[in-house]
Structures are given as C-alpha cells and as structure tokens.
Amino acid sequence: MRIFRWKAVTPLALLLGLMVIGWYFLLDSTVRRAIEVVGTELVGAKVDLAEAHVRLADGSVVLRGLEVTNPDAPMTNLVQIDEIVADLRLGPLLRKKIFIDTIAVRGVRFGTARETSGAIENPDPRSGALRRLISEWASSVPVPEFGIAGLTGVVNVAAIRPENLRTPEVALRIRTAADSVRQLWLGQLQSLDPAPVIDSARALAQRLQGSSLRSLGVQGVVRSVQSVRRTLDGVTVARNGIEQLGQSVGEGIRTLREEVAGLARARAEDLANARNLLQIPSLDAPDISPALFGQVALARIQPLLYWAQMAERYIPPGLDPRRRPGPSRARLAGSSVEFPQERGYAALTVAFAEIDLQLGGESAAAGRYRVQIVDFSSSPSVHGRPIRISASRTDAGAGPDAVHLVAVLDHVTPHIHDSVNLRIAGFQLPSITLPGIGFRMDLGHGVNELTLVRSGDSLTGSWLWSSSQVSWDRGSIGSGRVNDILWRTLSALRNVEVEVQVAGNITGPRLAVRSNVASAISRSLRGELANEIAAAEQRVRDEVERLVAQPIADARASVNEVAATVQRLVTQHQERLDEVKAELEARLRQLGR
Amino acid sequence: MEAKPEVRDMTSRVVTHLYRREKRSHFPVMLLLRLLQKLVRTLNSDGTPGQVALGIAMGSALGLTPLVNLHNVLIIAVVFLLNVSLPAAMLGWILFAPVGFLFDPWFDALGRVLLADTPGLVPMWTALYNIPVVPLSNYNNTVVLGSLIGWIVLAAPIFYLARWGVGSYRTKVLPRLLDTKVFKLLKASKLYNLYQLFQTD
C-alpha cells in the first residue's frame, strides 16, 4: 500500500491557493473588524471604522472613518479621525508583530456627535474598572466646605454635642486599652513573681554567711559554690524575665502616650468640624483654597491619573510574560501569554507618527496642531527606547498664542519614569462658580501650565492657571455685610493664580490647592470681621474644650497610673533581684578566699 | 410511435436541465447524503482498519483543538497527502468537536500551567515566541496549547481504539447487521433506493 497520496497534491495546492486568495480578499474586512473589536474592548464603547485598505505588497495600511465613542456619553465621539496612513514592515508580521515605520493621522476631531448610540450591551467590566477606582479615590479626597453664613449669625453652641466629637471616643478607647494592658502586665508580673527565687537565694546566702574553706572543707566549698552558681542562674533567669517584661511595658506605655498625644489632633479635627457644623469657616488661606477649588482640581486631576495608569497598563515596563484575554470565538477564549524578548519586536511598534489635528469652530482652541510621537512601543523594554511625544500649534488664527507639549514615557526599565510638560498661553481658561460664596469667576484668556512627573509609583506635579484678565459676576447673590465685603475684595481682583499640586502614590495622591483668591478673601474678612470671627471662634473653641478636656485628662491620668504602677513593680522586682544577686556573688568571693 | 431524433434530443436536454436544476437546489442535502454514504462505506469496507483509525485520530485534532489555527492546516495537509481515510478524518472531526467544547476548561487549565505557572519553561516559550511563523500558530493561547497537548496525548489511544473498533465492527457486527430482518426490510424499501440513487459509483 502506498503511503503518499500523490493525486492529492494538486487539489491540496488548489485548496491552499484558494485559502490564500480568500484571505487576501478578506484581509481588509478582517483588519477592519479586528480594529473595531479590539478597540471596543479597550474603550468599553463602540469603535467604528468605515474602511481599511491593506496592501501587503507595498506594506501600507490605510484606515478611513474611525469613530471612537465616548463611554461616558454614547451619542458623542471621544475622537473621530478621517484618515490614518501607515507604512508597515512585513518581516515582523511573520512573528505576529506590527512594526510601523511611519504613521500619518489626518483630520482628527474631538467630541463630534454620533448618528447612533455607541453604547455596548455588556461592556467588559475591566474597561471601566480603572475609571471606577479613580472615581472612588476622588470621592475619598476630603474637600472642605466654605460657607459665610456663620460669620455674622448667632453662634448656637448647643449644636455641638459630645456624640458628634471624636476626641471623647478616642480618649475612652485609650482608657480601655490602658486598663486592659494594666491587667495583662500585672498578670504577667504575678506569673514571673521572683519572691521564691529571692527567698531561696537569701536563705542560701544566710547559710553561707561566715563560711570559708577552713569551715566547709574542699568538698563542702565545691558543693556550696555549685549551689550558689545554680541559684545565681535562677536569679539571672528571673531577672531576664522581669527585664523583658519591663521592655514590653516600656514600649506599651510609649504607644499609649503617643495615642494620648494624638488626642490633640482629634481635638483640632473636632474644632474644625464644630466650625463646619456652625458654618464658621476657617479663614486661613490654605483652608480656603481647597474649599474653593478642590472640586475643580479633582475633576482636572482624575483624567491625568487615568491616563497615567492606562499608560502603565497598556505599555508595561519589563520583560515579564504578560497575560491577556484570548480571542473571542465559539470555543473558550482562554488567555494568551506574550513572551517579550530584549532586542526582539514588541507586539506593536510605531517608529514615527505624525498627527495633524484640526480643531474647527470659532473657539480659542480652533486651529491646527501637529503632534509627533517617536518610538512608540507596546513593550518599550523590547524596543529599548522611551516614547517621546511632542505637540505644537501650527496655525493659530484667533486661538492660543502658544501650545507646547513635551512628554516622555520611559518604560524601558521596571522603574517607570514619565514626565509631561504642557504650556498653553492665550487659551480660554474655565469659569468657576466659587462654592459657598456663589460669585462666578471668569478667568478669561491666560496661561495653563501642567507639569507632571511619575517616578516609580510616586507622582508629583502641578497644574497652574494664571490670568490677568479675570472678570467677576455676582449673579443672584444679594447684598449683606459679608457678601458686600467679599464682592468688594474679589471684583477688584484682576490677576488670579490657581495652582493644584499633586504628590504621593499614583493610586491615591494627595492634593493641595493654592490661590491668591483665597489669600484675598482671608485678608479682607479678617480685616473687616476680626472681632465677630474671634468671638464666634472663641465660643466654639470653649465649647469643644469643655466637652473634650475631661475625657483627655482621664485618658492621660489612666495611662500615667498604669505606667507608674507597673513600672514601679517592675523596678522593685529588679532591685530585689539585683540585691540578692550581689549578696550571692559576695558569698562566692568569700568561699574562694 | 417513435419520436423524431430532434424531438428526442430536445426532450433529453430539457430533462437534463431540470435534473441539474433540481440537483443544485438540493445541493446541501445531497452533500450530506454523500458524506453519510462515504462514512458508511468507510466503516464497512473502504480502506484498512489502520487507515480508518489514523483518519479518525487525525480528524480528532480538528475537533479537539480550536479549528482556525495553523496546526490544523498542517493536519489537513497531512490527511490529504498521506494515504489515510478522508471520510474517517471527517468522522473524527465530527465526533470530537463536542468533546473539545466539553474539555475546554481542562485544556485552559493545562495551558495555563504550562505557559504561565511553570517558570522553567519560560525561556523555551520566549525563544519560540520570537521565531518567525511560530507565533502565528497561537501556541501561546492557553486553550490552543492545552488542547494540542491533549490531542497529542490522546491521539495514540484514539488510533488503537478506533482500529480495534473498526476491525471488530467489520468482522463481527456488520455480518450480523446485514443478516437482521430490519436491515433486509430497509434494503428492500424505497428509502434505500433513494439512498442508492445518489451513489456516484
């Protein structure tokens, strides 16, 4: 029987040929569909592509009519791109890698309306997970309230109730803890009671008093020395036990005293809460700034955190294998693992990209922008070079005088180092209604400057808005003493600076806001309402002090009492053991004579 | 009265045309029937039990592993080029496709152990991942790798079991089956005539 079926060669070759031809003709729609599916998975909303033309012989790919839905507003496109032209290297395709030498993107528009909704029925939970995490962080950032109602009204201190204060609760917790450790330590002291050891040592010392080599003989001396040494060992063990307990007591007392010291912080928080309760605002500028601009700052910082973390997720550093969900199919998708290799090819590399952005309309942002991206790689450790992004305005018209963006995403080594520097001058800055005051501040055209540096997991940065053309709108805010003082102060303010500083871990950095608006408010209110504010604050302070002073004193006394009692007992035991030890050592010396 | 030759020709052309049109409209049904006939003939007499068993073992790869993958192109080429039973390969595919779906969670777990949880194998996977063409095989997908390994392990048992099964069927089951009244009745029925109508040879 023949093993090889020669007559099958021609049909097989024909079949393979047909498959290749079919693949060639279906390539365009396959690429289009793949971009839509992968894009939709990444964004969590529909990504549509009108057409894709792949010319493998020329190594060129042309994509037209790309629409990426905004997941938060399904009837709006996050971005719409008319045309993307890319030059591909064919060799890496055999390794299932995409290497684009150059890519040109034309006709980029943002926030365009969609004809149909881009929402998807069952969005991948992972695509929205990061957004949710950042929202949770934002809602956990405390933004103080600023209200002027309490500045002139009657201060009703009865509203301050002990159950609303934290200090008594913390003080009670400290007292309970002090009582518990007191019981524990006394129990331990009892179990380590050195009295039997001391008594036995004393008895031995007395028995050996006046003994010598002559009276006991050689054998008697040897036995006595052994007996003294054994007793001394027992004394040392008991001494060590007491000493260890003494150290543990010392540490415990230190911790309790730190807790007591922490009561001052709780008292300060209670005072601030009481002020808020009675709507007596703090008039310190560092407290007013976050109250006025905290929400605006959070709204601006959230997208930055989102993109910084997205950059890490999709452009991870290092060469560790990476697992991602497998392709959608009738069978189980499983996971696909990528195994990047140094000096190999990343899954996606774009050596050079030029994006021609055109913002239409009459707004200040209208104009042409040129964005260049160099050495973009989905695996910078493989590519070996950081990603560099720069953007500038090429045609301004009525818009900003200058737009300058430089960003470097260095994910080559496991220690991520990203930096972004953006400066836009002459741009329309936002209008902000000041919370608690109600006046509207229109910043007008000014400078918008963002500096952000990520090093490892720590993030530092600042966002500065400065304008010298600020205008104010009182809106429907009526007259009144405080309102009038504020209006006089603020409406005279033409130069305004608002600076948001961010620092800390990338997943939850701290925010600080500084503004000359807050300083002006603080100065003017302090100047004009000094007496009223001082009186109101004193009443609040007195009431809080009245409610928290006793619990604090009780907690402090409780801790002091525990410290005194236990430490005295420990010292006593130690001293008695030391005495008896000295006595035994004297007997030992005496026996040796 | 005998019809004129030209009338006969015309009648013949019309009948042929009608037959072809009918054949086209029933193409999928006919294809299935042809496949069924081939399968029955393969089991009954076509090829040696070894050829049939090898066909089933090769075809099981198409069923056990996700179909659209490079290794299956190789399997199809081998089935075509080697003298193994083609209908048996199809039978293997049909039989093992549901098994593949059923076993997917285990294939996924096996693939995960090999690809993600065995650090000792990472250098080998990394080297393979960076060799041209190899990544196109999707070996780095847990289900593809797990099912491929599963098929490699199961191929020999499937082959021996199928060879024994076909041999036993031909020598013991088929003669008894042919001798049963039911089969004789079936053979005498119109259904069998219809079945034979679609025989090509």
Image (cartoon, rainbow, N blue to C red):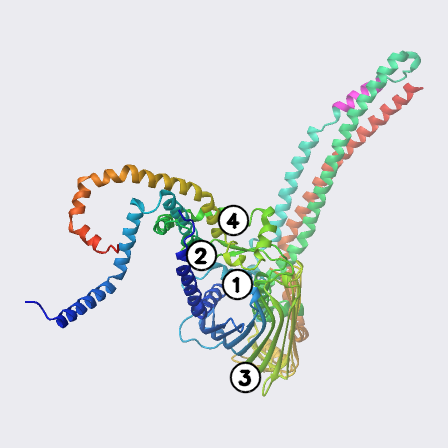
State the residue at coordinates (70%, 49%).
A258
| Number of residue marks | 4
When asked about the image quadrant of residue A592, the answer is top right
x%, y% of residue A362? 53, 86
Q: Which residue is mark 4?
A: B112
Query: Residue B138: which disc?
Result: none
x%, y% of residue A475? 53, 80
Tell me which chain the residue with mark 3 is part of: A
Q: Are marks 2 and 1 on the same chain?
A: no
Give the main secondary structure of the magenta stretch.
helix
Amino acid at pointer 3: Ser
Cα separation, mark 2 vs mark 4, equals: 24 Å
Cα separation, mark 1 vs mark 3, equals: 29 Å
**Which numbered disc flags the more N-terminal residue, 1 or 3?**
1
Please tell me whether mark 2 or mark 4 is closer to you in this view. Answer: 2
Amino acid at pointer 4: Arg
Tell me which chain the residue with mark 2 is part of: B
Cα separation, mark 2 vs mark 1, equals: 43 Å
A111 in relation to B137, above or below: below
Residue A529 appears anywhere in the view = yes
State the residue at coordinates (34%, 51%).
B87
Dot 4: element: helix
Q: Which residue is mark 3?
A: A363
Cα separation, mark 4 vs mark 3, equals: 54 Å
Q: Which residue is mark 2?
A: B73
Q: Is residue A199 magenta?
A: yes
- Label 1 neighbour load within 10 Å: few <14, some 14-19, many 20+: some
Q: Are marks 1 and 3 on the same chain?
A: yes
**Nearer to us in this view, A127 or B133:** B133
Q: Which residues are magenta?
A: A196-206
Q: Which residue is mark 1?
A: A131
Using residue A89 as the reference point, say whether residue B24 is left or right of it.
left
